[in-house]
């Protein structure tokens, strides 16, 4: 927002001296930017010099002896000083927002998005890069799927300045249509999100009290589940906004005026279709991995301070597993999906039998760790009981750390193979599961394969619903909008119901999993295209859907 538009609102009025200084000093933004960068560099250099002091010798030795901890120290340095860079550059950014006009804000917005993307990329690489090449559950690693996630989220962040540039490069009529569309769209998104958050807050208020959540932790909790909320409500927001915007402009003959200027119906609504396509890509980036993990992470946040033994999403309790080939039985109290040093497998019993079926030994451990690199098991605080020849337990030995020398075929992924719910797995995890369990029957894998295709079919519905709503929202000034709205809502219900039915058919292998996820989208894509073409030729778009009119003779 430029200075002239800010000054029109009383809430943004600034004293005259400050206004005069902002207007007269031509290089104020550059000076503040250079000053902020210099301050940040001084802070960073002082911190680096402090690391080389004698007081930090132990830290240096620790970093050399343990490469993993050196990587953690490097990330800690990066995250701390990258945030300090934002604080040092904030005055220059604020001045740019007050001084620059709207098209000139492209550079500050690009710099902010780049800073945020680099910060997010560093955090994600620190937490997930090693997991991408060595899966902690012991499944087949899928580094390609992980880098696709980085590309999708990078597009989502860096597309903001791209949309800003496209908006100011477009024509006046396109910008007018976009403004009329964005206001109801943002209103729907914010309103529906507020309703869902309020309902969730009422349902989980007791859990927040028991877990002793403060205000900021509650805010963090809803930031965690925000991707799932956006994936759920974006298509409804697009449908309502398209119907309201195009219907209102039609009633005031604004669509007719645009077409009188030589534009076709498709060219008039092109900005809305482009925005719907961008929303599909944005929802695909969220639904790729962030949204599926939101339920799991939010449930873990609610139960991290509770001592109940009830199962939570993302953690499996009381897990039995039988390795018939090696005659080994496992009983695990807690087995999390995201295995880490802080979230380990706990309270493990392993019963080993001899080849003839007689008992051999029992391992009872407080914690079990599976090394995905060495592919070996290590039990901590373990006790080993060995059976004697007369079927009695004769030896009891304790060990703080018991490393199994022989390679066991069991991995956390194989133990969880029949318990992993595809609803809480992202695309990389689903691909890993399918590659790891290729030998299983097709019916056992159909649900996971259908869910993987659904991760992309669901975001496509954002563009599909805009395509369906656009021709129904354009009506003549003398004809009511109720018919088009009713038809659009009916089509939305049909898409939602038939998509769910088709997906279940794919999960049950009544249809191929890919067809179950995409078939309804393909059918309604054809219907939406035909409706748009009929609206372009000034015919009622939904008449061809009425079977009673298929055989009516033409006049």
Image: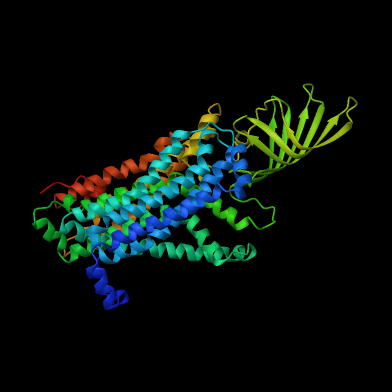
Q: Image height check: is 93 above or below 418?
A: below
Residue 551 horizontal/vertical position (percent)? 20, 45
- The quadrant of the picture occupied by the N terminus is bottom left
From this viewpoint, is residue 381 visible?
yes
User: What colour scheme governs how the chains and residues are painted in the rendered image of this protein?
Assistant: rainbow
Residue under the point 37% across and 40% down: 518
Q: Nearer the viewer, residue 343 or 202?
A: 343
Q: Is residue 51 left or right of residue 519?
A: right
Q: Nearer the viewer, residue 245 or 478?
A: 245
Residue under the point 32% across and 56% down: 238
Q: Residue furthest top?
A: 356
Residue 485 horizontal/vertical position (percent)? 28, 60
Q: Nearer the viewer, residue 93 or 310?
A: 93
Q: Quadrant of residue 93?
A: bottom left
Residue 542 horizontal/vertical position (percent)? 24, 51
Residue under the point 38% across and 45% down: 154
Q: Is residue 36 left or right of residue 208?
A: left
Q: Nearer the viewer, residue 44 or 19?
A: 44
Report the number of discs.
0
From this viewpoint, is residue 508 visible?
no
Residue 231 horizontal/vertical position (percent)? 42, 52
Q: Residue furthest front?
A: 54
Q: Image height check: is 26 above or below 287?
A: below
Q: Image height check: is 202 above or below 320?
A: below
Q: Is residue 123 left or right of residue 115?
A: right
């Amino acid at each position: 927002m430029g200075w002239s538009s800010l000054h029109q609102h009383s809430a943004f009025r600034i004293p005259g001296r400050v206004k005069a200084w902002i207007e007269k000093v031509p290089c104020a933004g550059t000076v503040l930017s250079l000053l902020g960068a210099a301050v940040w560099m001084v802070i960073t250099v002082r911190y680096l010099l402090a690391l080389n002091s004698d007081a930090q010798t132990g830290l240096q030795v620790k970093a050399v002896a343990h490469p993993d901890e050196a990587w953690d120290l490097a990330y800690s340095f990066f995250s701390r000083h990258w945030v300090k860079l934002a604080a040092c550059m904030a005055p220059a950014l604020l001045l740019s927002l007050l001084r620059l006009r709207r098209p000139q804000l492209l550079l500050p917005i690009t710099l902010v998005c780049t800073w945020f993307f680099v910060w997010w990329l560093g955090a994600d690489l620190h937490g997930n890069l090693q997991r991408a090449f060595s899966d902690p559950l012991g499944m087949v690693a899928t580094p390609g799927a992980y880098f696709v996630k980085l590309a999708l989220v990078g597009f989502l962040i860096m597309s903001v300045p791209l949309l800003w540039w496209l908006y100011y490069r477009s024509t006046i009529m396109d910008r007018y249509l976009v403004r009329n569309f964005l206001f109801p769209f943002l209103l729907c998104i914010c309103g529906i999100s507020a309703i869902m958050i309020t309902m969730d807050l009422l349902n989980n208020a007791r859990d927040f009290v028991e877990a002793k959540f403060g205000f900021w932790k509650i805010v963090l909790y809803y930031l965690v589940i925000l991707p799932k909320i956006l994936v759920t409500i974006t298509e409804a927001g697009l449908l309502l906004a398209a119907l309201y915007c195009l219907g209102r402009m039609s009633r005031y003959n604004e669509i007719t005026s645009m077409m009188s200027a030589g534009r076709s119906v498709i060219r008039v609504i092109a900005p809305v279709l482009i925005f719907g396509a961008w929303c599909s890509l944005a929802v695909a980036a969220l639904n790729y991995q962030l949204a599926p993990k939101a339920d799991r992470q939010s449930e873990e946040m609610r139960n991290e301070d509770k001592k109940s033994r009830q199962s939570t999403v993302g953690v499996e309790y009381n897990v039995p597993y039988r390795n018939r080939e090696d005659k080994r039985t496992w009983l695990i109290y807690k087995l999390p999906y995201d295995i880490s040093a802080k979230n380990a497998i706990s309270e493990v019993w392993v019963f080993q039998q001899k080849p003839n079926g007689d008992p051999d030994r029992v391992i009872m451990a407080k914690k079990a760790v599976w090394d995905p690199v060495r592919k070996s098991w290590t039990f901590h605080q373990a006790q080993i009981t060995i059976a004697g020849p007369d079927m009695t337990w004769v030896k009891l030995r304790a060990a703080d750390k018991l490393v199994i020398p022989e390679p066991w075929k069991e991995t956390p992924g194989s133990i969880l193979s029949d318990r992993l719910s595809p609803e809480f797995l992202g695309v990389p995890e689903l691909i890993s599961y399918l590659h790891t369990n290729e030998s299983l029957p097709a019916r056992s894998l159909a649900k996971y394969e259908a869910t993987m295709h659904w991760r992309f079919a669901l975001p496509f519905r954002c563009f599909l619903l805009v395509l369906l709503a656009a021709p129904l929202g354009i009506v003549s000034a003398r004809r009511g909008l109720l018919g088009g709205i009713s038809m659009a809502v009916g089509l939305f219900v049909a898409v939602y119901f038939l998509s769910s039915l088709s997906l279940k058919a794919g999960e049950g292998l009544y249809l191929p999993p890919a067809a179950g996820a995409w078939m309804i989208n393909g059918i309604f894509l054809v219907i939406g295209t035909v409706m748009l073409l009929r609206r372009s030729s000034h015919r009622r778009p939904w008449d061809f859907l009425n079977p009673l009119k298929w055989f009516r003779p033409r006049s």
